[in-house]
Amino acid sequence: MSLEPTLQNIRGTFDILPYDGRGEGVHEAPSRAWQHVEQVIRTVLERFNFREIRTPILEPTELIARGVGQLTDIVTKEMFAFQRGDTHYVLRPEVTAPVMRAYLQHRLDQQGSVQKLYYIGPCFRAENPQKGRYRQFHQFGVELIGTGTPEADAEVIAAMMAVYEAFGLRNLRLRINTLGDAESRPRYREALLAYLRPLADQLSPTSRQRLASNPLRILDTKDERERRLLEGAPRLIDFVNEKGRAHYEAVKVHLEAMGIAYEEDPYLVRGLDYYTHTTFELESPDLGAQRALAGGGRYDLLAVDLGHATPVPAVGFAAGMERLFIALQAQGYRFPEEPPLDAYLVSLGEAALHWALVQAQVLRKAGLRVDLDLKGRSMKAQMREANRQRARYAVIVGERELEQGRAVVRDMQSGQQQEVTLAELADFLQGAVRAV
Ligand code: AMP
């Protein structure tokens, strides 16, 4: 039987299969590699005592509009949003605003004045799909809520770096900057506008739009010509007040003491509105155009944007899983192999198939990985299947073996066969598998 493809998945999304895939709509890494990468991330973040939070994929549109910022690309252009009845829904484009919503909603401060939370899960943005940029992608990240100290910023950056270090990724570039606080940002904004307005006709259409909406974002431009224009622009750091500078200096001292190499980048502003003070971004040279592996910063004002009366100090990072995969594959990372099946039960005849079905349960309860033929195939086809599944042992049972209460156990590597009584089969296989 040969299958004919009918409907396809949506462009910019992909299936994660149990197999290596290079086809359209299939992520290159198999599900096994995803499980491994997720497990490493969890292990590292839990070592820092971050604990998992899972928030819904669906959120009220208002949360994202207010949290991420009305004038950001995400909200103006990239939201998958819809309405049913009076409710406006959005597929979450990021997880920081949802986590802050949950923190406020459930008064998590009462569970401990510092909350260390991490997440892993899908996010959605209606972007132009390309390598490293998808419409459904996966983020992991942390949010450290309840403290405004520079130590918290350093802890979050250290946790982010520890994840990539655990994978042995090399040549990463960490850039940091400070945006100052709510008092210094508007003053800088005015100075930047005064510098850029006379140059407006030399700016790209996007940047010209940002002049009106979010001029700091212009600093983020990748356009070389615009970058040169910006060389003479006022520098953010000159507008940051003493408190802001002291905070930034302390973060740098901590990073240095922890042996975390960084570069300062006065133009690093990041795309989301809620950042204050420290911002940072991690890049890999292996990612091509979409260089950012992860980014983050301090966002003390997010709670206020969401309607809370006072700021709630918080800092976090968000990282792309797919970009991590691209970097891992580029650097030749060896993902663990699928563990082999311990046993494949080969049965001949109806009674033997029934026995195999029941016996598989016994062996699985004993902790073995076991599969069996569920199709009534020929002996030859079943042995081929045992091979294809890389089973360590084939357990062969026909009517005669059943009658005699024995099975033929074949070591698939050496080809050696021996008879084992059915009563002893679980013990035998367990011992044999453990001995390997
Ligand atoms: P952001 O929430 O925009 O700061 O993104 C954080 C990280 O998520 C980025 O550094 C990327 O690694 C990843 N990311 C963001 N948008 C996408 C996307 N459309 N496709 C794949 N990864 C993304």
Image (cartoon, grey):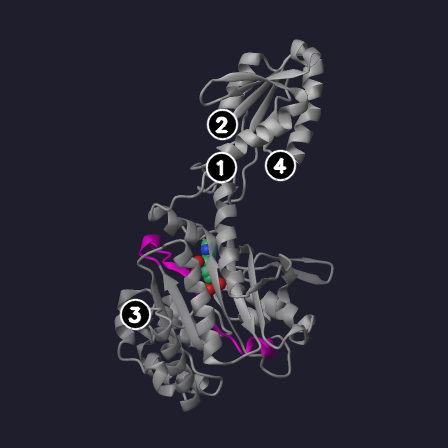
Q: Secondary structure at mark 4?
A: loop
Residue topped by disc 4:
367
Which of the labelled discs sits on residue 226, or is there none?
3
Residue on which the image places disc 1 = 338
User: Which residue lies at the image location 68% right of the left edge and 15% below the top edge?
Assistant: 405
Q: Position of residue 433 (x, y in %)?
A: 53, 32
Observer-side mark, 3 or 1, equals 1
Mark toward the start of the polypeptide (4 vs 1): 1
Q: Is residue 341 visible?
A: no
Q: Are marks 3 and 1 in contact (CB under 8 Å)?
A: no
Q: Amino acid at mark 1?
A: Glu
Q: Depth-wise, is mark 4 or mark 1 nearer the camera?
A: 4
Residues at badges 4 and 2 in contact (C-beta under 8 Å)? Answer: no
SS at circle 1: loop
Verify whether residue 294 appears in magenta: yes
Disc 4 marks a residue whose amino acid type is Gly
Tell me the residue that label 2 is attached to: 390
Going by the numbered disc 3, the residue's amino acid type is Glu
Instruction: Name the residue at the top extreme.
Output: 400
- Depth check, mark 4 against mark 3: the one in front is 4
Place residue 54 in its image quadrant. Answer: bottom right
Question: In this rendering, would 45 be left or right of 228?
Answer: right
Residue extending furthest toward the bottom: 242
Splitting the image into 4 quarters, where does residue 398 fall? top right
Which residues lie in the magenta part? 284-305
